[in-house]
Amino acid sequence: MRKYLIVIEKTSTGFSAYSPDLDGCVSTGATREEVERNMREAIAFHLDGLREEGQAVPEPHTYSAYVELPA
């Protein structure tokens, strides 16, 4: 099983998300839960498309971290 990082951002109309490991794989949703669910489906669809076209499925390579600074 592979784990792909997704970045979720609040927008004026809900939430948007993308995966830095998968160029062009994006989704939106009214809630954070919805955008996560939509992104899971978008990633599965994206990977299926790569396989059908005979392209390599990229390995996840990004990670996230927080940097704390004094307020």
Image: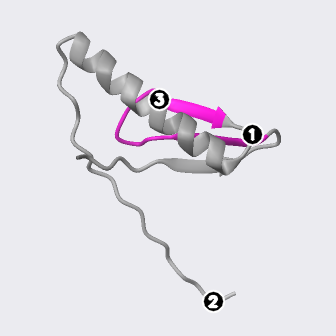
The residue type indicated by label 1 comes to Ala
The Cα–Cα distance between marks 3 and 2, rounded to whole angstroms, is 38 Å
Q: Nearer the viewer, mark 3 or mark 2?
A: 3
Q: Which quadrant of the figure has residue 43?
A: top left
| Residue occupied by mark 2 | 70
Q: Residue at x 40, y 50 (%)?
A: 5
For the point 52% across and 49% down, which residue is it? 7
Instruction: Name the residue located 68 percent from the left edge and 37 percent from the top edge.
Output: 29
Compared to 42, does 68 lie above or below? below
| Left or right position of 63 against 16 | left
Categorize mark 1 by other alpha carbons within 10 Å: few (<14), some (14-19), many (20+): few
Q: In this view, which residue lies farthest toward the right? A: 12
Q: Give the labeled residue for mark 1.
A: 30
Report crowding for label 2: few under 14, some 14 to 19, many 20 or more residues within 10 A (C-alpha): few
Based on the picture, tell me whether residue 53 belongs to the magenta stretch.
no
- As helix, strand or loop, the secondary structure at mark 3 comes to helix
Magenta residues, start to end: 14-28
Q: Nearer the viewer, mark 1 or mark 2?
A: 1
Residue 39: x and y in percent read: 51, 37
| CB within 8 Å, label 3 to label 2 | no
The answer to which of marks 1 and 2 sits earlier in the sequence is: 1
Q: Earlier in the sequence, mark 1 or mark 3?
A: 1
Q: Which mark is residue 42?
A: 3
Place of residue 52 in the rendered image (x, y in percent of width and height, measured from the top left): 24, 11
In terms of secondary structure, where does tag 2 sit? loop
- Of pointers 3 and 2, the one earlier in the residue sequence: 3
Is residue 26 in the magenta section?
A: yes
Q: CA distance from mark 1 to mark 2?
A: 33 Å
Q: Amino acid at mark 2?
A: Pro
Q: Hey, what amino acid is under mark 3?
A: Ala
Residue 38 % position (x, y): 56, 34
Q: Is residue 63 left or right of residue 27?
A: left
